[in-house]
Each structure stands twice: as structure tokens, then as C-alpha cells.
Image: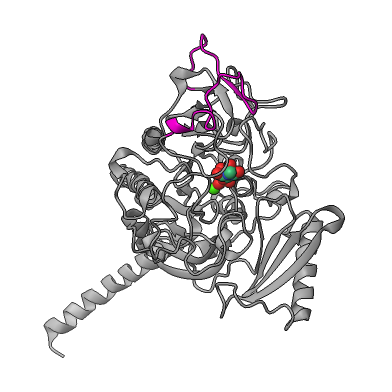
Amino acid sequence: MNRRFATSVGLLFPALLVVLWAVDRSNALAADSPPQRPNIVVIMADDLGYGDVSCYGAHRVRTPNIDRLAREGLRFTSGYCSASTCTPTRFTFLTGTYAFRQKGTGIAPPNATALIRAGTPTVASLLKQAGYTTAVIGKWHLGLGQPPGPDWNGLLKPGPLEIGFDYCFLLPTTNDRVPPVYVENHRVRNLDPNDPLWVGMKRPSPDHPTGLTHRHLLRMDWSHGHHDSIHNGIGRIGFFTGGKSALWRDEDLAEEWVKQSVRWITENRDRPFFLFFASHDIHVPRMPNERFQGATPMGFRGDAIVELDWCVGELLKTLDRLNLTEKTLVVFCSDNGPVLDDGYKDGAVEKLGDHKPAGPFRGGKYTVYEGGTRIPFIVRWPGHVQPGVSDEIVCTVDLAASFASLAGVPIPPGGCRDSFNVLPALLGRPGARGRDHLVQQDNGNRGNFGFRQGNWKLVRLISGRGKNAKRRLELYDLSVDPGESHDLATEHPEIVRRMNDRLQALIDAGHSRGAD
Ligand code: NG6
Ligand code: CA
């Protein structure tokens, strides 16, 4: 061995040891230090189906920003919301408790009062307790105020601020329900006290124009329902008078959610924050901004998907610009499966072509087949979520317990009763499992349920009423029949019985965490 070489080895070796020690030390530090608490942004689309975005197979509409989330994050093939309509999914997401456990959690009417009782533990209250600043921006549809009804001209209380949100900027009901106003914190924004807002389900006067009496004036005709008060040339559900200075235009909603979110994120960039971004897209009436109209060959339903994707892009750009991308966990999901004609003649049926809104699944909005609740579900947190595709079963009901675990707060006894901590599965940790079972509901008023357990799917349907009510059970093997087309109930009566017993036990127990 030559001397120079020997000297270099003699110097290099201790240096290598120092480096190895330092690497080892930094690993030890990383393991010792408390888990990072990222900002959390949940983007919930409205009525967006499994097959409606390009990263889940759509080709007649392109969704580059949602696709970016999928590319940089984990895309779930068995991601669910808990109900096939809006109100029960949102109730379940926020409370971590299945909506069917509380009566009156079906689609909320225009004058619904707060459905989530003040003080109920929610995703927002748990994160607030962990030191997060919290906001909901967009569609609410969980009622405001107390009986006998919301005080539209006064304080709209209780609402989001009484269940853990520090700030709210809302579409109070749906875009097809009155009143067409924004609610900011406890008040209707821009309301002129000299022009009070009245909301009701009865025609306020015989000369009040409606979608029936003035149908010829509508710029988008209705196909069913939606013929009460007319606003922005479109018939709505329910009646309203007054509040002129507070009224929005359908075409501006998406931009307003983005504007308020960008402002709020910017203001809160230095603290851990939780934003629930609840888009009204692609719920009816689909009336996207003028610049998106005609963006797809699928009419306004396709164009509304492009508008939704634009919103996602603006949020991602804001995180990039503020250097928050690495510090923010983003979840993208939907509140229920797809529907084409949901009460307006907007061309969704005629212009569909070979687009498959529910992807390979059966049913959609209002049903307990997979298409009703299986949705695009993507989780991104650069550096923490391994990008890829996951077949684990996860549901929006699990976000409460999973975020509580991430933020290091306990769930109070009796709270979030159906929420499982599936954080390792959400982060794509190797070998991490999601749920082994999931109860799926429709709007909740009939007793229909879907029950997935592994790859088996039980469908429980009630037909008829009162004494004539009949229960029908169907069984599908999703591993070979994702489209639920081949009912195996007569072939496997023992599986049907076992699954139906477990479903009933979960319903009766009042909770599913700790029920087995
Ligand atoms: C239905 C409406 C539908 C939609 C739905 C709620 C009619 C005929 N149908 O009653 O258009 O508003 O309620 O949708 O009025 S959800 O996504 O908010 O649950
Ligand atoms: Ca919906």
C-alpha cells in the first residue's frame, strides 16, 4: 500500500465515522421530535362521480389540476363518501358519526336549522383544539340557526362557528335552493336592512313570478322540481323575496370561493390551518362562469368539471406561491356520486357521449350501489405521502379520527363514533390497512343500505311502505363484479345472513368504533 493512499484512508475513515454518526443522530432526532402537523385542506366536490375526472379515466373532459394531485399524491380506488346525497355525507364527514344515526339528516330544505348540535366534536373542533385555525368556504347545506328557522336578517346562529370553525363563507343551502346569497360568519353578506330577505316554501303572493307561471322567461328550463322563485333566469327550490343587494350570480360562485380561500390562506399562512373547501360544482343548476362555457363537448355538466378543476388549480398555485405545498396535506373528494338530469334541461344526458360519470360502477347519486358513494379520493402531502395508487378502503367519515391522530388530539368519549384512524393508509405507509367494512347510505329516509366487507357487497333495499314494506337483499363480489350486475344472494345465503347480521349490529350499536 503506498503511503499517500494509507494516509488518505487514515484521514477518510474517521471523517466517514463522523458523517455516519451525524446521519444516525439526525435520524434519532427525527424519531424523537413530535410528528409534523401539516396544514390540512379538504376539497369536497358536489355530485362528482368516480369517472368524472381524467385521472380516474375520463377522456371527454380533462382535469389537469386534479390529475396533478393524483400524480403527486395517493389516488384511492376504494375511496368513499358515506352517503349518496349531500347533507348526510357532510354531516358524517364533519362529525365522524354516520348520519343515519340522527333523524332529519337527509337533504336539508331552504329553511333548515343547524343539524349538528353546538358542542358536537367535529373535524374542525378537534383541529381547533390542536391549535389549528379553521375555516369552511363554499357549500354548507347543514342548516343554520335554531327553530323555528334561520333569522336571515339577523344572526344566523348556531352554524359552523359553533362547531369548531373560526371562519365561514357560505352558500347556505344549495345553488338550486333559495336564498341565493352568501353568508359570512353569522350574517348574510351585503344585506340591506331596508330590503329584508324572506325565505319560505309558500308562494308569497299570487303575482310572485315562478318557474311555472313565467316558464317562458327561464334561460335554463327545469325538468322536474325547481319551479318556485326565479333567480338569475333559473327556477329554484323554495321562495324568497327581498335581499336584492345580497344576491349572487351562479356564474360567479366558483371564483368567489377561490377569492375568499386565497385571502384566508394568505392571512393564516403562518399557523397550522384547516380549510374545508366545499365547491358547489358540479351540482345543478350547472351554470359555470362564461369563460368555461363550451370548454367541453359535454355541455354545462362537463364545463362545470373544468371550472371545479380550475378551483383546485388556484388553490394549489396559492400553496406553491406561499411555500406551503410541502407543509400541507390536501384531500380531494366528492359528496356523492353522479347524476345527469337532476332537475334541469342542461344537456347533460344528450351530450354525454361515451363518458362514464360513475366509472365502472353501478348507480349514482341517491343509490346505495357503488356509484352512489365510491368517489375520486386523493391524498397529497409531498414528502410524507408516497405517490401512487392504493386499493385500501377509506371513507370521508374517517378523516375526523385520522386528522385527530395526525394533530395529536384525543377524540372525546362518545364523539366521532364511526370514524376510524386510517392515517397510515391515507399516507400510503407500506402494509397499512384501511377499513375492513363500510356502511353506505342513501338520503337516509327509507332504510336502504350498502354494506361493504372486504370484497363482498351487501345491498339492502326497502320497497313499499308501512305494512307493505319489503326488504330485499342482494350480494355482489366486487373483486370480479365491480359493476354489481350479478346478484349472488341465492348462491351464498350464509354470507348474506352473516353480513346482514353485522350490518344490523352496527346500526343497533350506535357506533362502529369498538363495536366488534
Ligand atoms: C333534490 C333535488 C335535486 C338536488 C337534491 C339535493 C328536485 C326535483 N331535486 O330534491 O335537484 O337539489 O335534492 O342534492 O328538486 S344534494 O347533492 O345537495 O344532496
Ligand atoms: Ca351533492
Magenta stretch, main secondary structure class: loop
Query: How far across and how far down the image is residue 435, in percent?
Result: 62, 66
User: Can the viewer see residue 516?
Assistant: no
Residue 409 counted in the magenta span: no
User: Can the viewer see residue 56?
Assistant: yes
Task: Name the outermost residue toward the bottom.
Answer: 1
Q: Is residue 79 above or below residue 252?
A: below
Looking at the rendering, which quadrant does residue 269 occupy?
A: top left
Query: How far across and how far down the image is residue 485, in percent?
Result: 59, 74
Query: How far across and how far down the image is residue 211, in percent?
Result: 52, 32
Seen at 75% across and 59% down, the residue is 463
Q: Nearer the viewer, residue 137 or 195?
A: 195
Q: Nearer the viewer, residue 163 or 21?
A: 163
Locate the C terminus and report the quarter of the image it occupies. Answer: bottom right
Locate the N terminus and report the quarter of the image it occupies. Answer: bottom left
Span shown in magenta: 189-218
Q: Is residue 385 left or right of residue 461?
A: left
Q: Is residue 190 above or below residue 214?
A: above
Q: Is residue 323 left or right of residue 442?
A: left
Seen at 49% across and 17% down, the residue is 191
Query: How far across and how far down the image is residue 196, in percent?
Result: 55, 14
